[in-house]
Image (spheres, rainbow, N blue to C red):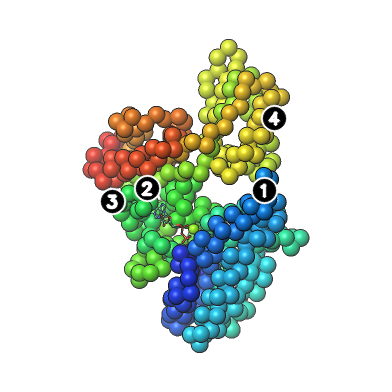
Amino acid sequence: MALVVQKFGGTSVGNIERIQHVASRVVETLDAGHRVVVCVSAMSGETNALVELATQAAGDDEPEPREFDALVSTGEQKTIALLSMAIHRLGRRARSFTGAQMGMLTDSAHTRARILSIDTDRLRKVLDAGIICVIAGFQGVDEDDNITTLGRGGSDTSAVAVACALEADVCEIYTDVDGVYTADPRIVSGARKLSRIAFDEMLELSSAGAKVLQIRSVKFAKRYGVPIHVRSSFEPDEGTWVVPEEDVMERLVVSGVTCNVNEAKIHVKKVPDQPGIAAQLFTPLGESNIVVDMIVQNLSSEGTTDMTFTVPRSDHRRALELARKVGGELGAESVEGDEDVAKVSIVGLGMKDHAGVATKMFSVFAAEGINIQLISTSEIKISVVIEEKYAELAVRALHAAFVEEGAAAPSFE
Ligand code: ADP
Ligand code: ASP
Ligand code: MG
């Protein structure tokens, strides 16, 4: 008997028929002799509609974060009740749990809270009684019982965190694609499904914008060694296993090409080139929970330097205000923001063993006439920032060069 956590995304629970379909899949797993926790998202479109309502209610201001979370978390609360009812209809027992009811304790960073602990005793008791636990993704509570949410796509993280806490055998992520592909299949028709991908590759792909898994879910799975199986809600076939590196057979030079159009760029011009400047600039951003992604500092000239960095687009306004304030104090010539950007990345474990990957990537951009604004690299990823309108073209061109014409891989070192 295994303990299985199954997560169903918004499209998979998008209407009552689909919820009924999910109920039968869950019941199949129960009837096969397993204990089942099901984690669900809000019905598709629901969270966006709630965000829109909040924006309308707040007018010119940002919605107050505590109330924003109280509102947007209601989408998942609807789904847990509906799915539990659909399971009852099939003659099996199920019990719904909000974040608070399952003891999903988070910090107080509204709209992007981090999970601190989960009260597994409550879930275990119900599971031991042969009852299916239907838990709300995306939400938790802080120590003062304020409702918090985990950021867009956060139900993946709820599911994997519960799987880790319960030491589940697997966390199955059911979604509207049948696995993790070499690129978003909606952008690249020739993308191919990977049978396995390493935790580190998936981490890089998620951070680079492949929204199939929220990055924090992959971090949890890696830390606790719980395998994730990404698969289709609608087809029975095996999907993609996200596993430790040693369990991946194929070390592809490029296993994924992805883009992120949810970032903004901030350019701080001519700040004094002295020790401590970067710390002064980035400390207020960190204190405001704004995650800075790429950072590039130009070579200094005449005692000053330029700093350019990217932040999530949803934080752009706040980040720009903070950067302008500090920039002013530091004597910067100007601080400008730009939302017309996209980050395009290639990821692959095999990059560790190959030379010339970056050169080949830059040649692809040159051939397409796309200007590169920023570049950053890690051992298994290269990212560039370009103008947003070229994002999909760039993904297709890189996929063609690195995956479809894989044989023309750069030479071995
Ligand atoms: P859910 O609502 O089930 O959480 P999401 O919309 O969050 O689903 O994530 C699934 C989507 O991720 C797919 O529909 C696909 O368009 C997108 N996606 C982006 N990159 C990839 C990739 N490399 N492989 C598979 N899907 C991807
Ligand atoms: N409903 C939330 C969202 O749309 C969480 C999730 O679906 O993972 O972002
Ligand atoms: Mg998602």
For discs 1 and 3, the disc positioned in front in the rendered view = 1
In the picture of the structure, the residue carrying the numbered disc 2 is 256
Q: Whole-percent x and y of residue 17?
A: 45, 75
In the picture of the structure, the residue carrying the numbered disc 1 is 59
Q: Please tell me whether mark 1 sits on a helix, a strand or a loop.
A: loop
In the picture of the structure, the residue carrying the numbered disc 4 is 325
- Residue 371 visible to the viewer: yes
Image marks 1 and 3: residues in contact by CB distance under 8 Å: no
- The CA span between labels 2 and 4 is 39 Å
Disc number placed over residue 190 in the picture, else none: 3
Q: Which residue is located at x 55 percent, y 14 percent?
A: 301
Which of the two discs, 1 and 3, labels the residue nearer the N terminus?
A: 1
Density class for disc 3 (Cα within 10 Å; few <14, some 14-19, many ≥20) is some
Q: In the orientation shown, which residue stands out farthest toward the top? A: 302
Amino acid type, mark 4? Lys
For discs 2 and 4, the disc positioned in front in the rendered view = 4
Quarter of the image containing the C terminus? top left
- The CA span between labels 4 and 3 is 47 Å
- Residue 164 visible to the viewer: no
Does any atom of ligand 1 lie closer than 8 Å to the CB of label 2? yes
Q: Whole-percent x and y of residue 258?
A: 40, 45
- The CA span between labels 2 and 3 is 12 Å
